[in-house]
């Protein structure tokens, strides 16, 4: 194969081809394929008791009755891009935390929160996964308890197209870009959030399984083709 490539491609093209072959696995800033190896990517399950498993590269989180919101937390990270496809049961909403924090015993009350958080609770910006028109918006999980589009006066981004971007019962593609103080999200190619806020310069990515009412469930949320890269 090497002799064939050398004979048919100019040296410059051969070099580009080899770089492309290695781009997924090598070097800072290159794309990583999370969960492709069947592991939980070194993440820790915190805040609740939902179950997480990986099969054929698909991360599935499933509710546990009586459990509060649960998260598979990975990180921390600063600037990054994250892409994935997600499919969620209609009765469940979910989300992906970015630059979020794990509360520790003795921590002060986070700015904007109503009180101290229990140790182990993940809090911070969360990109919403839901069928009710809020998908792609960011919610300030366990802290201010409201949407970042309201906190930053960027509701204009929440157009009719943004609210209709998430397709019920289907696999939906997300792209999340966080750089400096700037946060953006896109659902199926439609811009769904675009705001700046300086309060969370670094933190964890967290795949959420929402708590459910007693006597309901179990429900699941599934992520596949999860790609991540750090940026500068």
Image: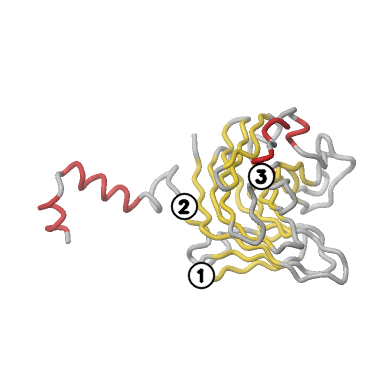
Residue drawn where x is 66% and y is 29% of the image: 196
Q: Image point 59% across, 31% down: which residue?
A: 180
Near-viewer residue (197 or 153): 153
Dot 1 or dot 2: first in sequence order is: 2
Task: Return the residue at label 1.
Answer: 56
Q: Secondary structure at mark 1?
A: loop
Q: Label 3's element? A: loop
Q: Nearer the viewer, residue 45 or 163?
A: 163
Residue that numbered label 2 is attached to: 32
Protein image colouring:
secondary structure
Give whichever of discs 3 and 2 has the lower sequence position.
2
Q: Is residue 31 left or right of residue 44?
A: left
- Quick one: label 2, few (<14), some, or many (20+) residues within 10 Å? some
Q: Give the image location of residue 97, x and y in percent.
A: 68, 48
Residue 142 location (% of width, % of height): 81, 46
| Inter-mark Cα distance, 3 to 2 | 22 Å
Measured as percent of width and height from the top left, residue 183 is found at 62, 35
- Count of labels in the image: 3
Using the rendered view, name the quadrant where residue 48 is placed.
bottom right
32 or 169: nearer the viewer: 169
Q: Disc 3 designates what residue?
A: 136
Circle 3/circle 2 CB separation < 8 Å? no
Are the two marked residues, 1 and 2, in contact with CB atoms closer than 8 angstroms? no
Compared across the picture, whether 40 is left or right of 47 comes to left
Mark sitting on residue 15: none
Q: Residue at x 49, y 45 (%)?
A: 229
């Amino acid at each position: 194969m090497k002799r064939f490539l050398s004979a048919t491609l100019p040296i410059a093209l051969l070099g580009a081809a080899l770089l492309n072959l290695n781009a997924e696995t090598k070097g800072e800033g290159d794309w990583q394929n999370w969960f492709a190896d069947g592991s939980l990517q070194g993440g820790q399950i915190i805040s609740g008791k939902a179950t997480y498993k990986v099969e054929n590269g698909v991360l599935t989180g499933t509710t546990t009755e009586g459990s509060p919101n649960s998260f598979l937390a990975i990180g921390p990270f600063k600037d990054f891009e994250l892409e994935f496809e997600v499919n969620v049961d209609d009765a469940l909403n979910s989300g992906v935390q970015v630059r979020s924090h794990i509360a520790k015993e003795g921590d002060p009350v986070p700015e904007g929160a109503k009180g101290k958080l229990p140790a182990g609770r993940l809090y911070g910006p969360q990109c919403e996964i839901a069928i009710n028109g809020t998908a792609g918006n960011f919610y300030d999980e366990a802290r201010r308890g409201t949407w970042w589009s309201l906190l930053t006066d960027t509701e204009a981004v929440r157009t009719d197209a943004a609210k209709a971007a998430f397709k019920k019962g289907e696999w939906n593609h997300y792209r999340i870009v966080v750089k400096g103080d700037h946060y953006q999200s896109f659902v199926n190619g439609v811009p769904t959030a675009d705001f700046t806020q300086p309060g969370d310069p670094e933190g964890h990515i967290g795949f959420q399984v929402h708590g459910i009412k007693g006597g309901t469930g179990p429900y699941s949320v599934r992520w596949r083709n999860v790609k991540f890269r750090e940026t500068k």
